[in-house]
Image (spheres, helix red, strand yellow):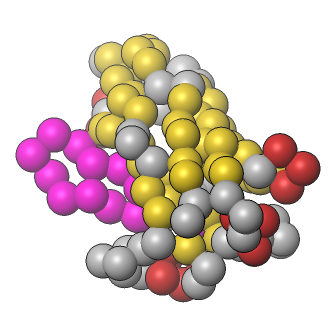
């Protein structure tokens, strides 16, 4: 079982930046793909980005390409989401996810192995 704990959310002005962190623990976490989803008020949860276990492959939703960057520090079992040029429509609760299969995260499979508790991001206009 992989446990995930997010941090770094908060309130930021439009055009600003935030960095989210997701600390993972568990015996096999280093072999898992990890990613981020978000859920805005009144909307379904949506895929944001994912990174494979090596950190050599990434995938982004079109809505965040060029503005968000995912990275991971294998030595710390931590994945980061650098969010730049934030827009009010980025306001959401951001959830970290982990799964042995990279494409299950990309496709938003309903049975992704592990989820964090979420961290709220609010972008003021």
Q: Residue at horizontal 58%, vertical 60%?
A: 2
Rendered view: 79 above or below 111: above
Q: Quadrant of residue 22?
A: top right
Q: Where is residue 51 in the image (x, y as percent from the top left)?
A: 68, 66
Residue 96 at what x, y percent from top left?
A: 50, 51
Q: Nearer the viewer, residue 3 or 45?
A: 3
Residue placed furthest toward the left: 42
Q: Which residue is drawn at 55% across and 29% down?
A: 7
Residue 85 visible in this rendered orientation of the protein: no
Magenta stretch: includes residue 45: yes
- The residue at 65%/50% (across/down) is 24
Q: Is residue 65 visible?
A: yes
Name the image quarter holding residue 98: bottom right
- The x and y percentages for residue 15 are 50, 24
Name the image quarter holding the N terminus. bottom right
Q: In this view, does 29 lie above or below 38?
A: below
Q: Position of residue 8 (x, y in %)?
A: 55, 26
Magenta: main secondary structure equals strand
Left or right: 68 in relation to 79: left
- Residue lying at 31% horizontally and 18% vertically, measured from the top left: 125
- The part of the chain drawn in magenta is 37-51
> Which of the pair 78/40 is nearer the observer?
78
């Amino acid at each position: 079982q992989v446990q995930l704990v997010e941090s770094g959310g908060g309130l930021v002005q439009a055009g600003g930046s935030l960095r989210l962190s997701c600390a993972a623990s568990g015996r096999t976490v280093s072999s898992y793909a990890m990613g981020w989803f978000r859920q805005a008020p009144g909307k379904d949860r949506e895929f944001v980005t994912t990174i494979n276990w090596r950190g050599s492959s990434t995938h982004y939703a079109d809505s965040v390409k060029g503005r968000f960057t995912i990275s991971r520090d294998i030595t710390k079992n931590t994945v980061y989401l650098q969010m730049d040029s934030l827009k009010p429509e980025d306001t959401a609760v951001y959830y970290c996810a982990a799964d042995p299969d990279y494409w299950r995260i990309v496709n938003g499979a309903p049975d992704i192995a592990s989820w964090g508790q979420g961290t709220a991001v609010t972008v003021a206009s």
